[in-house]
Image (tube, rainbow, N blue to C red):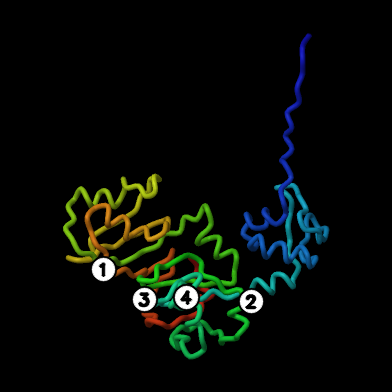
Amino acid sequence: MPFTFTINTMSEPIRLSKLMSERGLCSRREADSYIEKGLVFVDGKRVSELGTRVDPDCAIRLDAAANARQAERVTILLHKPIGYVSGQPEPGYQPAVTLIRPETLWQDGRAGRAFHPTHLKGLAPAGRLDIDSTGLLVLTQDGRIAKQLIGDHSDVEKEYLVRIEGRLDEKGLALLNHGLSLDGRKLRPARVVWQNADQLRFMLKEGRKRQIRRMCELVGLNVVGLKRVRIGRVRLGDLPLGQWRYLRDDEAF
């Protein structure tokens, strides 16, 4: 007896908050907050129930109030000194966010924005920078930027100047570019070139814990200084050590 089967061409429904995050409208946490407040419209209809599932091809619109809240969220660029941790504080050390004060705002930042205490609410680092490293650290209230920089599928390149001790031959340099593994997992290809006689320039698209220091150890090098100078298209530039500025409207990672 012949049999028949039906192919379901309909897309599986997806959680609205997840879809909003995937489309870059906001973070999932922000999406849940907007949904709960009734500030999200799906195919022209207001949605206010958390956990709502929708067609992946639906039209999503944020209420004007939600758009205004998104526009108010700030992103801060900090020149982190050694001795500060990017995330949760370790015993005896302070988190880098404690440096975000009116008196440490770089006066040449040209952001056209005045500091307000609300800019500290929900401000979190978008990526890590080791306690013994310095350079550009991003802190943001904007879940979209956090996802862009540290999301699972982030492809944003980060650039570091690394001062080293030890001898590095061509084979070792080739391994730093591609061929090393950490914790049993192969590293993504990197770009590593000589900056000067005792300094390398690393350009990476991943950021495992103490990755550069561990990579250098694998080829017989000791890192004596590490400074992050760029994240995506945003550079540290002349931002003084221990000071910060706002990400400008004409800048993007």
Residue placed most toward the observer, 235 or 36:
36
Residue 231 versus residue 216 in the image, above or below:
below
Report helix, strand or loop for mark 3.
Answer: loop
What amino acid type should be assigned to the residue bearing mark 3? Ile
**Which labelled disc corresponds to residue 224?**
1
Earlier-in-chain disc, 3 versus 4: 4
Camera-near label (4 vs 1) is: 1
Residue highlighted by disc 3 = 82
**Mark 1 neighbour density, 10 Å: few (under 14) some (14–19) many (20 or more):** some
What amino acid type should be assigned to the residue bearing mark 1? Val
Residue furthest to the bottom in view is 103
Residue furthest to the right in view is 45
Residue 163, percent from left and from top: 25, 67
Using the rendered view, name the quadrant where residue 48 is placed: bottom right
Residue furthest to the front in view is 91
What amino acid type should be assigned to the residue bearing mark 4? Leu
Residue highlighted by disc 2 = 72
Earlier-in-chain disc, 2 versus 1: 2
Residue placed most toward the observer, 91 or 147:
91
* Label 2–label 4 contact, CB within 8 A: no
For the point 18% across and 50% down, the residue is: 170
What amino acid type should be assigned to the residue bearing mark 2? Glu
